[in-house]
Image: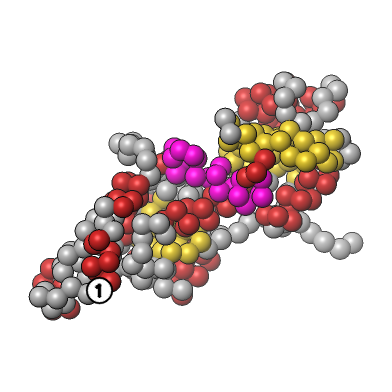
Amino acid sequence: MDTGRNASLLNTSRVSRRQLMLAAGAGFAGVRSLSADDTVLTARQVVERIQKNVGIPWREQTVDNFKDGSNPDKPLTGIATTMVATFELLHRAAAAKRNMIIVHEPTYYSNLDDPKDVSTDPMFRLKRDFVAANNLSVFRFHDHWHGRKPDGIIDGMAVGLGWKKYQNPDNARLFVLPETTLNTLAIQIRDQLKIRAIRVVGDPQVRVSRAAFNPGSTGLNQVMRYFSGDDVDVFVCGEPREWDAVEYARDSIAAGKKKGLIVLGHDMSEEAGMAECARWLKGFIPEVPVEFMPSGEAFWSPTGA
């Protein structure tokens, strides 16, 4: 922090009423005390507060860090939480003066966001240069948001789906819903989450009530777990591989299992979890606006003849 600049901006003999109020509440939720030298909030300070409030130890090896081109020490004008820092989302955030973007998934096309993997690619350079030119800070919040108790993504998706009251208190991934058909449930989910390209495996008229949910990447072992047993009627998930996980579900149904698989897509199976992240951040980030900005869905389904 530039203390010389701070001294010129603030009369060090006086502290504003807002600063006094914030300092008084500093012990709550890990907000540190503000002094006369604290004239701005930076992205780096926001991350320090996240680390204090997330409720689990911060990992040494993690993808949760600032991304290439980011400027974590510039004064913040606002925070946007989102699922993916798409090029379009970055433009929207910059225009809205949300110069810190807290994102759940990679920004530069690989899990580690390693610039050397794509450093000569024109799209990488365009995106990185836009982040730098607009003094944006892009921070990924994945491992620790999932690791939080309760899992921040699953908790937010339960709210987004309208399923919170149906959630198993001992297993947040399980729900007992009002009985309906597989087709009707898929329509309800599609409309609730505004998904354009939802996909379903199974008999549209099979009756379902006991649901399991898995956000994001969904492995074969998870599909096997819910399709081999008799405790779940429908598995709602993010992104299963078609050549193994989906085929296991299809074969299980052909073999007589009265079950369904509803595929939301990776982004749409986690996006409401980043809306929950914005609500959570507002509890200990009072200095700047905090807003959930949906990055939306990549896919769409054609209409018409």
Residue 137 as seen in the image, left or right of residue 85? left
Residue at 79 percent across and 31 percent down: it is 259
Residue 131 in view: no
- The residue depicted at 85 percent of the width and 35 percent of the height is 207
Q: Amino acid at mark 1?
A: Arg
Vertical comparison of 154 with 68: above or below: above
- In the image, is 258 to the left or to the right of 224? right
- Binning the other alpha carbons within 10 Å of mark 1 as few (below 14), some (14 to 19) or many (20 upward) gives few
Residue 58 falls in image quadrant = top left
Quadrant where the C terminus is found in the figure: bottom right
Q: Residue at x 78, y 45 (%)?
A: 185
Which quadrant is home to the N terminus?
Answer: bottom left
**Is 183 within the magenta?**
no
In the image, residue 159 lies in the stretch drawn in magenta = yes
For the image, the number of numbered tags is: 1
- Residue 255 shows in the view: yes
Query: x, y percentage for residue 33?
Result: 21, 58
> Which range of residues does the magenta coloring cover?
145-163
**In which image quadrant can residue 194 be found?**
bottom right
Residue 37 coordinates in the image, percent (x, y): 15, 68
Magenta segment main secondary structure: helix
| Rendered image quadrant of residue 31 | bottom left
Residue at disc 1, secondary structure: helix
- In this orientation, which residue lies closer to the viewer: 169 or 234? 169
Residue corresponding to mark 1: 17
Q: Is residue 18 above or below residue 146?
A: below
Which residue is found at the position 62% from the left and 45% from the top? Answer: 164
